[in-house]
Amino acid sequence: MGEWDEVMDVVKRAVAAVEARAGRVSLVLKADIRPGVTDGLTSKVETVERYLAGGQQTS
């Protein structure tokens, strides 16, 4: 995880690295930005792991 500008810099460098070896780069980004929510990705992973382990899924 990182700040917006840091994350976008990583994306930009990754695209440049692929572009150097390929004539075409396809990139899809999706963001779920919600004020007041921190560490949402970790929470989602924990929910999936709990579900896979047979526990109850919570909202």
Image (cartoon, helix red, strand yellow):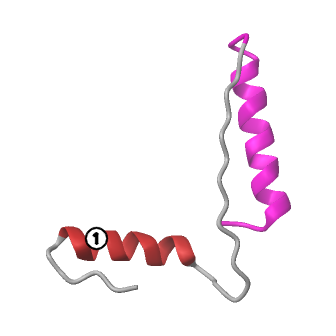
Image quarter where the C terminus lies is bottom left
Image quarter where the N terminus lies is bottom right
Depth order, front residue of 38/56? 56
Single out the residue that lies furthest toward the front: 59
On screen, residue 13 versus residue 31, left or right, reads: right
Q: Is residue 40 above or below residue 1?
A: below
Instruction: Determine the secondary structure under disc 1.
Output: helix
Q: Which residue is mark 1?
A: 49
Depth order, front residue of 23/2? 23
On screen, residue 47 versus residue 5, left or right, reads: left
Single out the residue that lies furthest toward the top: 23
For the point 70% across and 23% down, the residue is: 25
SS assignment for the magenta stretch, majority? helix
10 Å crowding of disc 1: few (<14), some (14-19), many (20+): few
> Would residue 42 be counted in the magenta stretch?
no
> Would residue 5 be counted in the magenta stretch?
yes
Image quadrant assignment for residue 51: bottom left
On screen, residue 9 versus residue 41, left or right, reads: right
Counting labels gives 1
Image quadrant assignment for residue 49: bottom left
For the point 71% across and 36% down, the residue is: 14
For the point 48% across and 74% down, the residue is: 42
- Give the residues in magenta: 1-23
Residue 37's spot in the image, x, y percent?
Answer: 64, 84
Residue 40's spot in the image, x, y percent?
Answer: 55, 76
Q: Amino acid at mark 1?
A: Glu
For the point 67% across and 47% down, the residue is: 29
Residue 13's spot in the image, x, y percent?
Answer: 78, 38
Residue 46's spot in the image, x, y percent?
Answer: 36, 76
Q: Is residue 58 above or below residue 24?
A: below
